[in-house]
């Protein structure tokens, strides 16, 4: 598993405009979006004791969370993802799911998961059985993303964060969500072994400091 360095900063609209200009001059927009911009829908898993939420709020050094995700309403590209944190570094594993598999999972039908031969799906199955993981809430937001080759750098700006409360109707594009009222705009920078100075300079903002913001935790404050 490859762990990456990451920074998160809470920023405002003026910061976002400035960053857009700076990053546009030195990095490339993410080719997966229109001009690097796209909408993200995630569905996070947790158990009845809110294990993932509590580990995040407590700052547990070694933690993980599972989620489903797709982009711009495209159900042909659903991903099951596992995000892990250890010693301040982050990693992500992902595998594709079909609409049929996703629907079955949302309906509580997990019988197919062991038959896939896919380790990540089998791991989620095991933790649904042993830890009681289950879908908890939808998180929607808009993302602007930039990439820079040296250092394998990825910079994202996330905003218009919305929560599905306790809704788990993940495949329904018309599922009602509401703004996560106190959620800020989030700047996130990820890189491998080194962060090039041109990117470090571009993302420097006066008065902004590294934060431990979690979109999942912000949206769970509503239910």
Image (cartoon, rainbow, N blue to C red):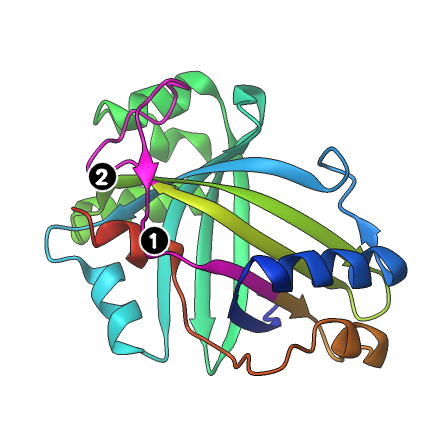
Bin the neighbour count of mark 2 within 10 Å (Cα to Cα): few under 14, some 14-19, many 20 and up: some
Instruction: Please report whichever mark, 1 or 2, sits nearer to the chain's N-terminal start.
Output: 2
Above/below status of 214 relative to 180: below
- Is residue 111 visible in this depiction of the protein? no
Query: How far separated are the C-alphas under marks 1 and 2?
Result: 11 Å
Task: Report the front residue among 158 and 49.
Answer: 158
Q: In the structure shown, which secondary structural element does the residue marked by tag 2 occupy?
A: loop
Query: In the picture, which quadrant includes the N terminus?
Result: bottom right
- Which residue is pictured at 24% across the width and 61% down the height? 53
Above/below status of 149 relative to 202: above
Is 12 inside the magenta-drawn segment? no
Residue 119, position in %: x, y? 46, 46
Q: Which is the main secondary structure of the residues drawn in magenta?
A: loop
Magenta segment? 163-188
Q: Is residue 3 left or right of residue 126?
A: right
Asked where in the image residue 31 lies, by quadrant, the reply is: top right
- Which residue is pictured at 76% across the width and 80% down the height? 194
- Which residue is pictured at 11% across the width and 51% down the height? 48
Q: Residue most toward the left?
A: 48
Is 179 inside the magenta-drawn segment? yes
Q: Is residue 35 left or right of residue 119?
A: right
Above/below status of 53 relative to 206: above
Q: Which mark is residue 216?
A: 1
Task: Report the front residue among 117 and 11.
Answer: 11
- Is residue 113 visible in this depiction of the protein? yes
Residue 35, position in %: x, y? 77, 38
- Which residue is pictured at 85% across the width and 75% down the height? 198
Residue 12, position in %: x, y? 53, 62
Q: Which mark is residue 165?
A: 2
């Amino acid at each position: 598993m490859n762990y990456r360095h990451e920074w998160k900063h809470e920023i405002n609209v003026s910061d976002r405009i400035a960053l857009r200009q700076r990053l546009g001059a030195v990095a490339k927009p993410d080719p997966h979006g229109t001009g690097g911009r796209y909408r993200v829908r995630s569905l996070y898993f947790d158990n009845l004791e809110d294990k993932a939420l509590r580990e995040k709020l407590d700052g547990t050094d070694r933690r993980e969370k599972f989620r489903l995700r797709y982009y711009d309403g495209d159900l042909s590209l659903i991903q099951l993802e596992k995000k892990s944190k250890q010693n301040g570094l982050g990693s992500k594993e992902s595998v594709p799911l079909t609409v049929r598999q996703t629907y079955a999972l949302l309906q509580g039908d997990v019988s197919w998961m062991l038959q896939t031969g896919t380790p990540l799906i089998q791991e989620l199955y095991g933790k649904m059985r042993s830890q009681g993981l289950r879908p908890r809430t939808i998180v929607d937001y808009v993302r602007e993303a930039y990439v820079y080759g040296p250092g394998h750098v990825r910079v994202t700006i996330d905003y218009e964060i919305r929560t599905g409360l306790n809704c788990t109707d993940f495949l329904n594009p018309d599922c009602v969500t509401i703004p996560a009222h106190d959620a800020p705009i989030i700047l996130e920078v990820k890189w491998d072994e080194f962060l090039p100075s041109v990117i470090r300079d571009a993302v420097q903002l006066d008065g902004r400091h590294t934060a431990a913001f979690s979109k999942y935790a912000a949206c769970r404050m509503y239910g």
